[in-house]
Image (spheres, rainbow, N blue to C red):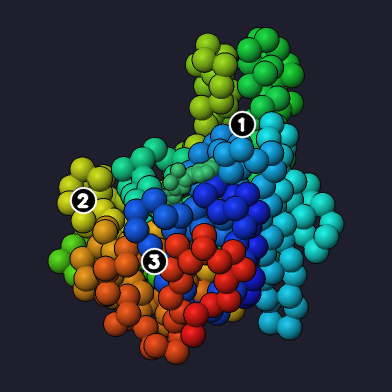
Amino acid sequence: MHLTQLKLLSYRNFKTLSFIPHPRVNLIVGPNGSGKTNLLEAIYHLGTGKSFRSTLSNRIIQQGAETTHIYGVVEKPGFPFSIGVQRQRNSPTVLVLNQQNVANAGSLASLFPLRLINPDSFNLLIGGPKYRRHLLNWGTFHVEHQFWETWKLTTRILKQRNAALKKGAKTLIKSWDKQLEHYALALLTMNQHYYCLFEPIFLQLIKEFLPKIQNLSLRYFPGWDIAQPLSEILEVNYPKDQQRGRTHAGPHRADLKIKVANIPAKDILSRGQQKLVACALLLAQGILLKQHLGIHCAYLLDDLAAELDQSNLKRVCNLLYDIEAQLFISSLEQNAVFHTLFPPNAMKVFHVEHFHESPSLTPPS
Ligand SMILES: Nc1ncnc2c1ncn2[C@@H]1O[C@H](COP(=O)(O)OP(=O)(O)O)[C@@H](O)[C@H]1O
Ligand SMILES: [Mg+2]
């Protein structure tokens, strides 16, 4: 599936924009501050309903405007559909699918799967467990249809359990513990299934990207010691949980442990090597979707040329091209490297400044 049309209205520094992307590679060039990242961020909204830059959703509305609109058409083979994201200042974001309002972003994510590689992706290595958990859950969500519902229910139970902890309502907590255990086991099965598919693909990429690092390992940690029933762990943890008003064990604490010779990868790999591991994690997800479900994921590559050396950049781009991912790559104009990486007829180059000069630009040939 790929994006065939994008329209923006009062979005950041774009007053209006109409963009017809190439189904394979889109190179978005322009000087600093011209709007390259803004354009990728707008596309990201179509797959997630949110920004990757700011949690303050008002920021995306053009200064001086009251409302912003993002509209896209995504082509699933033989089945095009439209996605709209509208945001009025100080109001909730409205998501529209084929002209019908949708309640949650889960519907968008399953229709237009996309992955972003930008300088923040390196949080996958150096950041807390939430970044890796999010990666694992994103992948599981695409492979396991029950995942989203189960995850939402688990989050709701955890909220209620934590509220009961703060009140010291022990009998109430017992009933939440049983339910939490039930859903935690369902999530465990789904995450484990995804992880078993994911791990060999990831390790194969590591062999290619970091041939000198031979003992890098990945392990899925479910968020509690699964040798024991979760309800028993919750019982033992009760005093600690109550004292802090939160639940210390459960699927909300899941993580992927990345180690080299049993030392956390972030403490032993160079910054450049960490970037490659982060890329491998994100690439493995697109490869898995293609291999197991025939789904083509779109990739947004923001400033990647500034992050990787040329041979690794080439490796990443070739891999993504081979899995037929639609690519949106931002780059400074003087960076000619991308022109050599893809067949000329598989790529279109868009100059961001032209979008500002001529709002309904058709792609240059
Ligand atoms: N809400 C907004 N309204 C108007 N302009 C904005 C808004 N948010 C960001 N910008 C402008 O967008 C530009 C940055 O765009 P960006 O996509 O980050 O550039 P780059 O091409 O370097 O990736 C800045 O000039 C900034 O002032
Ligand atoms: Mg940028």
Q: Return the residue nearer the eye: 88 or 118.
A: 88
Q: Disc 2 on helix, strand or loop? A: helix
Q: Secondary structure at mark 1?
A: helix
Any mark on residue 231, and which? 1
| Relative to 60, 302 lies left or right | left
Distance from Cα at disc 1 to Cα at disc 3: 54 Å
3 vs 2, front mark: 3
User: Which class describes the residues within 10 Å of circle 3: few (<14), some (14-19), or many (20+)?
Assistant: many
- Mark 2 highlights which residue? 271
**Percent from the top left, x then y, of residue 273?**
22, 57
The quadrant where residue 250 appears: top right
| Helix, strand or loop for disc 3 | strand
Do residues under tags 2 and 1 come within 8 Å of each other at their CB atoms?
Answer: no
Q: Is 84 left or right of 31, judged from the image as shown?
A: right
Q: Does 169 appear above or below 80?
A: above
Q: Indicate which disc, 3 or 2, sits on the residue closer to the N terminus.
A: 3
On the image, the x and y values in percent for residue 339 come to 32, 80
Q: Which residue is mark 3?
A: 29
Quarter occupied by the N terminus: bottom right
Of the numbered discs 2 and 1, the one sitting upstream in the chain is: 1
Q: Nearer the viewer, residue 215 or 98?
A: 98
Residue in the foreground of this view, choosing between 327 and 37? 37
Q: Nearer the viewer, mark 2 or mark 1?
A: 2
Q: Residue at x 29, y 82 (%)?
A: 340
Residue type at the position of mark 3: Val
